[in-house]
Amino acid sequence: MINVPELKVFVTAAEELNFSRAAQRLHLSQSAVSQNIQSIERAYRVELFIRHGRSVQLSEAGQTILPMARDVLNSARLLEDALANVNGEVAGELSIGCAATSGRYFIPNLLASFQHEYPHVRTRVNLMPRQDVVDGLLDQTLNIGIIGRSIEHRELETQLLLEDRVILIVPANHPWSNLEQVKPSDISNQPFISRETNSGTFEVLFDNLRRHGIDPESLNVVMQLGDAEAVQMAVEKGIGITFISEVMASRSLALGRVKKVHVEGFDVRQAVYLIRHVSRVFTHAESRLWDYVKLNHEQLTADLLFNLSDVTLA
């Protein structure tokens, strides 16, 4: 008889192609991962992985059974969900892949509100690149995702989670800090802190700059950082100016560490979406979260902005 926990180890190892990373995901030791896989291989006299020192590849047999193993785990997941919810109580686990920076700030507010309604639901959030979220949803290794750009794909559906404004922030002592607004052309003359070009926020920003006749390549980029929090900190330290999620900047603005400056003609907004596979069979908790966001996203956004700006300096 197939052992479901061992099957979960196999699938995780197949996704990672690295026993050490699989062990980290499963909160097991690397030796435990190896032993679980060897147990299946011995029981069925099959080689699931081809081992090359520390690296592994799926064998032909491993590739063959991987989709079936995922189906078994999904069936077990749905059975466990049905048993947990047999008395009408919504319970179980939510696993969310999050790629949007502003979504990361939104999640605690969303989950606090959601779990107030459904206290028996446990949630695990994994931060990952946007393409990993999309790929995980398409191969159904991920059930729900949060991304910063809408995806047009016949197998995926999205709904609005948050509409975030992208604003210009400058250091508190910057000459612009007391100005009501500046012209778009003024931006090119300022030291600019940028994120990597595949950032959802900066993709939206660069599209807007081009519409105002500004080539993003003309910006005086003095520093490029891979993390939005690091970008914001660089502005706080006076290194340069940047555009950033208003949700993310709310606390620094309230503390007076940075100043928001309006750019003439700019109204840049970035929608953040909840996304899922159209043919996935969802657990009670996953379905309730989807419906909860649909009904409450405007109030959740308002609550988030209030909470982030409600900072005391005492």
Image (spheres, rainbow, N blue to C red):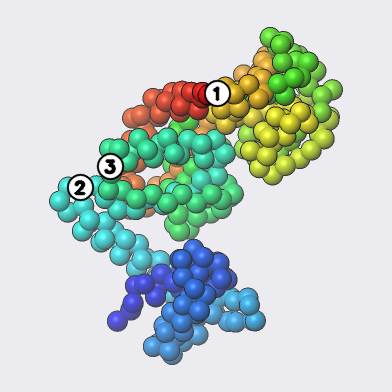
Q: Quadrant of residue 201?
A: top right
In screen coordinates, is 298 left or right of 253? Answer: left
Q: Amino acid at mark 1?
A: Leu
Quarter of the image with the N terminus in it: bottom left
Identify the mark nearer the N-term, 1 or 2: 2
Identified at 79% across, 38% down, the residue is 223
Q: Is the Cβ of the residue at disc 3 closer than 8 Å to that at disc 1?
A: no
Q: Find disc 1 in the rendering and name its residue.
A: 313
Identified at 70% across, 29% down, the residue is 236
In screen coordinates, is 221 left or right of 147? Answer: right
How far apart are labels 1 and 2 at the CA level?
42 Å
SS assignment at label 2: loop
Q: Amino acid at mark 3?
A: Tyr
In the rendered image, is residue 138 in sight? no
Identify the mark nearer the N-term, 3 or 1: 3
Q: Nearer the viewer, mark 1 or mark 2?
A: 1
Q: Nearer the viewer, residue 144 or 138?
A: 144
Residue 227 in picture, x, y percent from top left: 66, 42
SS assignment at label 3: loop
Farthest residue to the left: give it. 87
Which label is found at residue 89?
A: 2
Identified at 45% across, 58% down, the residue is 141
Residue 303 in picture, x, y percent from top left: 42, 25
Q: Nearer the viewer, residue 312 or 159?
A: 312
Q: How many marks?
A: 3
Q: Find disc 3 in the rendering and name its residue.
A: 118
SS assignment at label 1: loop
Identify the mark nearer the N-term, 3 or 2: 2
In screen coordinates, is 150 left or right of 231? Answer: left
How far apart are labels 3 and 2 at the CA level?
8 Å
Mark 1, Cα crowd under 10 Å, few <14 / some 14-19 / many 20+, is few
Q: Nearer the viewer, mark 3 or mark 1?
A: 1
